Amino acid sequence: MSKEAVFTMKLEPELRDAFMAEAEASHRPASQVVRELMREFIERQQQAREYDAFLRAKVDAARVQIASGRVASSADVEARSAARRAALRARAGTADA
């Protein structure tokens, strides 16, 4: 990949010195470390946006279900879960705990 773009930034001298020392200690050019950090940042941001979109879709679907009356109370869910657990225990041959 061609590296023709130049990126200039201002930062505290202490931060620059510490960064340069750590890059040198890891036997890598500072520019390589910065590129890696940029790629990681981009990846995290993209994953966060994808998760937000996924979550929005789940919430929208739940709102549609609520609006259409397709909901169950907490007590109903607990009762169904208890019945399922009992059936699984009976199938497994264990006593109710």
Image: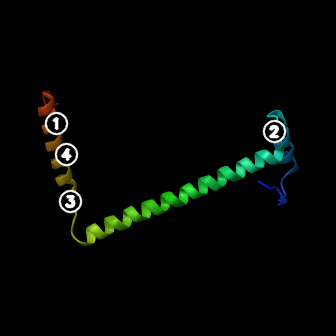
Circle 2 residues within 10 Å: few <14, some 14–19, many ≥20: few
Residue type for callout 3:
Ala
Of the two numbered discs 1 and 2 in the rendering, the one whose residue sits closer to the viewer: 2
Q: Which residue is mark 2?
A: 28
Mark drawn on residue 72:
3
Pick whichever of labels 1 and 2 is earlier in the sequence: 2
Residue type for callout 4:
Ser
Q: Nearer the viewer, residue 63 or 73?
A: 63
In the figure, residue 4 lies in which quadrant? bottom right
Residue lying at 60% horizontally and 53% vertically, measured from the top left: 44
Question: Which quadrant holds the C terminus?
Answer: top left
Indicate the secondary structure of the residue bearing disc 1: helix
Q: Which residue is mark 1?
A: 88
Residue 81 versus residue 97 in the image, above or below = below
Pick whichever of labels 2 and 3 is earlier in the sequence: 2
Q: Which residue is mark 4?
A: 81
Indicate the secondary structure of the residue bearing disc 2: loop
Pick whichever of labels 4 and 3 is earlier in the sequence: 3
Indicate the secondary structure of the residue bearing disc 3: loop
| Callout 3–callout 1 Cβ contact below 8 Å | no
Residue lying at 85% horizontally and 38% vertically, measured from the top left: 21
Q: Mark 1 to mark 2: distance in Å?
A: 57 Å
Q: Mark 2 to mark 4: distance in Å?
A: 56 Å
